[in-house]
Amino acid sequence: DGGITQSPKYLFRKEGQNVTLSCEQNLNHDAMYWYRQDPGQGLRLIYYSQIVNDFQKGDIAEGYSVSREKKESFPLTVTSAQKNPTAFYLCASSRTSGGMNTGELFFGEGSRLTVL
Amino acid sequence: AQSVAQPEDQVNVAEGNPLTVKCTYSVSGNPYLFWYVQYPNRGLQFLLKYITGDNLVKGSYGFEAEFNKSQTSFHLKKPSALVSDSALYFCAVRDLGDDYKLSFGAGTTVTVRA
C-alpha cells in the first residue's frame, strides 16, 4: 500500500547525542515535511522540501538538520544543539496539481523521541 | 501572518448528537483552510479543505465544514456523532506567501460518549 513510513516509532536518546529519524514515502509526492508536535501546541513546521536536493527552514529549524537526496526519503537529524528535543515528530508529504501544492498532507505514524 | 485559533480545548457530546468543532482564522486575503483528525499515537489524516466556491464543504467520514467570511470562521460539523469520532481535531490555514506552509491550530479533543 502507498504511504509514509517513519522509523523508529520510539527512540530514547541521552543528552548530547545526535539522532536521525527516518521518513520514506512511496506516494511519488514531490514535497515532504517534518513537523514537531507538543501537547497543547498543535504542529510546528521544522523543515520542508519541495523537490529533491532542495529544502527550506520552517518555523523551528534550530537544532535540526535534513537532507533530500532521493525523492522517496527525507531524514531528520535532531542534533545536540536542540535544547528541548523530547517530542512527537511527524513526517508528511503532499502532491502538486497544476504546478501548485494542494496542501493536502499525508502523514506518517510518527516517531516519539525521549531524551533521558 | 496567517493563523487559526481553536477556542475549545475539549468538546464532549453524546453519540447520535450533532458535533461541532470551532475554528476561527486570521488571514489577509482569501484563505485556504483545512481540517485534519488525529487518532491516539497516530499521524494526522486529512478531512476536508476550503479553497473557493461553496461555503459548505463536504469531507471524509461524514464531516462537513462551513466557511463564514463575515465571522472569519470555518467550523467542522457532523450531524450525528459516533464514538469512533473521538479524536484530536486540527484546523489549519495555508500561508499566502508560501503554499507549502500550513499553520495549525492547537487542536480540539473530541470525546463522544456512548
Image (cartoon, coloured by chain):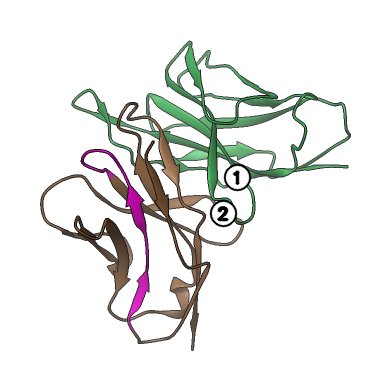
Chain identifier of the residue bearing label 2 in the image: B
**Which type of secondary structure does the marked residue at label 2 adopt?**
loop
**Which type of secondary structure does the marked residue at label 1 adopt?**
loop
Q: CA distance from mark 1 to mark 2?
A: 6 Å
Question: Residue B26 location, x and y as percent?
Answer: 34, 47
Query: Residue at (10%, 50%) from the top-left corner?
Result: B53
Quadrant for residue A23, please give it: top right
Q: Quadrant of the C terminus of chain A?
A: top right
Q: Amino acid at mark 2?
A: Arg
Q: For chain A, give the colour.
A: green
Quadrant for residue A30, please give it: top left
Quadrant for residue A17, please give it: top right
Q: Does residue B107 lie above or below B79 as drawn?
A: above
The part of the chain drawn in magenta is B18-32
A38 left or right, relative to B22: right
Q: Which residue is mark 2?
A: B42
Q: Does residue A43 lie above or below A48 as drawn?
A: below
Q: Quadrant of the N terminus of chain A?
A: top left
Question: Residue A41 location, x and y as percent?
Answer: 58, 51
B40 left or right, relative to B37: right
Q: Residues within 10 Å of mark 1 (few under 14, many from 20)?
A: many
Please say if the residues under marks 1 and 2 sit with CB atoms less than 8 Å apart.
yes
Q: Residues within 10 Å of mark 2 (few under 14, many from 20)?
A: some
| Residue farthest along the left direction in this orientation | B53
| Residue B21 on the magenta span | yes
Any idea which chain is the brown one in this picture? B
Chain identifier of the residue bearing label 1 in the image: A
Q: Which residue is mark 1?
A: A110
Badge number at residue B17: none
Secondary structure mostly seen in magenta is loop
A77 left or right, relative to A26: right
